[in-house]
Amino acid sequence: MIKSILLTGVGGQGILFAAGVIASAAEAAGFNVTTNEIHGMAQRGGSVTAQVRYGDGTFAPLAVSGSIDVIAALEHIEAIRWAHCLKPDGLAVVAKTSVVPVTVTTGACSYPEDVEQRLHAVFPRLVYLDCAALALELGNVRLANTILTGALSAGLPEIAEDHWRAGLLARVKKGFEEANTTAFLKGRSLCSAT
């Protein structure tokens, strides 16, 4: 068994943190793990992607297009951009977040108004969460990525919850353990992995 996860969003949303949590959780569960990240213009709000692959005989960090088991996106248009990578029966966990690019603010392009309909059209197994609003309820909008990570964890049952907690705590800065654990468990409770 090899599992492939693609995380996507824009710079500053915590994609690389989420990838680190998944990798640490998979390692804690005893799997071989490989990772890859691309964050080009991330500091200017550009696209960020990371892949985590784990399982027996996992050597390459990149999966073939159409073979990804789970796509997790902290920006919903970025989810659509990478939809072609997901298996036909794959799970998409997507945050209801719009990060408007410069091309839209300058008038060169327009931001789609029918994002939710487009998501449902390309992802038969979709978990669509307002991670930012949920994070604000917990007192810190920066917990949105942890909520998303908790939600996607429900779609990867071969990693036990105690391994997820170990992976999370291995990546969280000292003093933020309780808030992140609460956020993770909140996300996990909201995803039945459809």
Image (cartoon, rainbow, N blue to C red):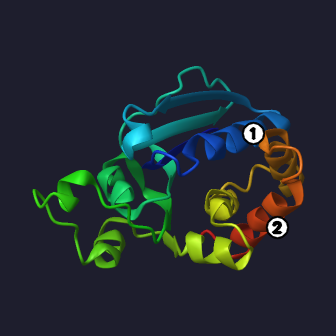
Q: At 16% from the left edge and 57% from the top edge, which residue is drawn?
A: 106
How crowded is the residue under tag 1: few (<14 C-alpha within 10 Å), some, or many (20+)? many
Label 2 sits on a secondary structure element that is: helix
Q: At 59% from the left edge and 20% from the top edge, which residue is drawn?
A: 59
Furthest-left residue in view?
108
Three-letter residue code for mark 1: Ala
Q: In this view, does 51 lie to the left or right of 137?
A: left
Q: Is residue 193 left or right of residue 31?
A: left
Q: Name the residue under label 2.
A: 182
Furthest-top residue in view?
59
Query: Height in image: 35 above or below 179?
Result: above
Using the rendered view, name the quadrant where residue 97 is placed: bottom left
Using the rendered view, name the quadrant where residue 107 is placed: bottom left
Three-letter residue code for mark 2: Thr
List x then y, in percent, for residue 126.
47, 70
Q: At 87% from the left edge and 54% from the top edge, which residue is drawn?
A: 177
Q: Nearer the viewer, residue 15 or 22?
A: 15
Q: Do we see residue 191 in this rendering? A: no
Question: Looking at the rendering, in which quadrant would you find the C terminus?
Answer: bottom right
How crowded is the residue under tag 2: few (<14 C-alpha within 10 Å), some, or many (20+)? some
**Which of the labelled discs sits on residue 120, or is there none?**
none
Q: Mark 1 points at which residue?
A: 26
Mark 1 to mark 2 CA distance (whole Å) = 20 Å
List x then y, in percent, for residue 136.
65, 75
Dot in front, 1 or 2: 2
List x then y, in percent, for residue 64.
39, 34
Q: At 52% from the left edge and 37% from the top edge, which residue is drawn?
A: 51
Label 1 sits on a secondary structure element that is: helix
